Amino acid sequence: MYWQTFKESWQKLWKNPSLLLPDFLYITIFTLLGYTLLRYYGMVDIYRINGIKSFISILSNYNLLPGLIASIASFVIVTFFLGSSLLSWKYSMIKNRINGKNNGLICDFRDGHKKIMSVIFIKMIVFSISVVALFLGILLIAFGKFNGNYTAGLVIVSIIEIIFFIFYIAGIFFRYPMMFSSNLNAVDSFKESFRFVMKRYDIVIVTMLVTLTTGFLVVASFNFVLSMIFVSNKTLPIIFGIILGVWKDIFLFDIYRHVRKK
């Protein structure tokens, strides 16, 4: 199943390059908005002249600071909702292509629009649990330091945190294929994804290993080729990153489709 799905996922990406469009749009808009924000506060020119130390002087300027904080907050909010919208569009496209449907980008966008709130909610759930886990870890380390067991506490808490996040990442690995393929809401997708890893941990582990190994080999090969031809380009790694990310999504959706059929 894995090798066949691996080949099919690359073939589907090759035949449907439009699947890359949402991620390219997000990177482009994110870059333009970020550059506009930095340009508005003069950070681009100041950085070119004075380097990183110039940002310290800007942050210490109390006249600029409130506006800068408000602008950054607006930037984060806009990119968060924009990213969720484009993510819904991308996953709707992947679901339709895997099921043999090609109704056009507009229809895909309309289908994805129905899942925007679910995507937003599940991103908030994942983020909130991650923050709480990190915060509890920091509290435990601080408690250990207060009681004179800083080193031992740091080691123990670090091990616990690593184990937790490995299981957590595995638990949420199939959340989006379940949400879009099984038409589930945010909470149900989150719960079903964890149930899936408990019942079919072998599939989750192999799928994670395949995606990680593929990503590592592609990136390593890409860097090797660039070093051999003495080319330094900041755009190409972004493009390769987008291609790898979309392939991984197709692979996950395809694996889940095969599992559902059994």
Image (spheres, rainbow, N blue to C red):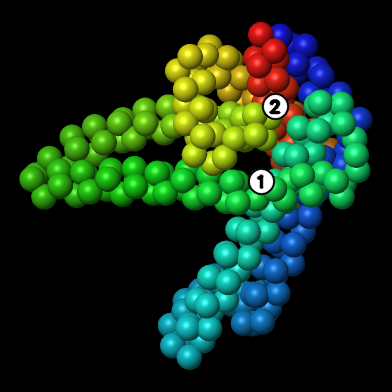
What amino acid type should be assigned to the residue bearing mark 1?
Lys
Say left or right for 10 vs 145.
right
- Picture coordinates of residue 237, whole percent (x, y): 74, 44
Judge whether 28 appears above or below 256 on screen. below
Q: Is residue 186 above or below residue 26?
A: above
CA distance separating discs 1 and 2: 16 Å
Residue named by callout 1: 115
Left or right: where 51 falls relative to 15: left
Residue extending farthest bottom:
63
For residue 212, which quarter of the picture? top right
214 and 126: which is toward the camera: 126
Badge 1: residue crowd in 10 Å (few <14, some 14–19, many ≥20): many
Question: Residue tagged by mark 2?
Answer: 253
Q: Residue 209, can we see it? A: no
Quadrant where the C terminus is found in the figure? top right
Q: Amino acid at mark 2?
A: Phe
Quadrant of the rendered image containing residue 41: bottom right
Q: Is residue 176 above or below residue 59?
A: above
Residue displayed at 65% across by 50% down: 116
**Residue located 66% across and 46% down the image:** 115
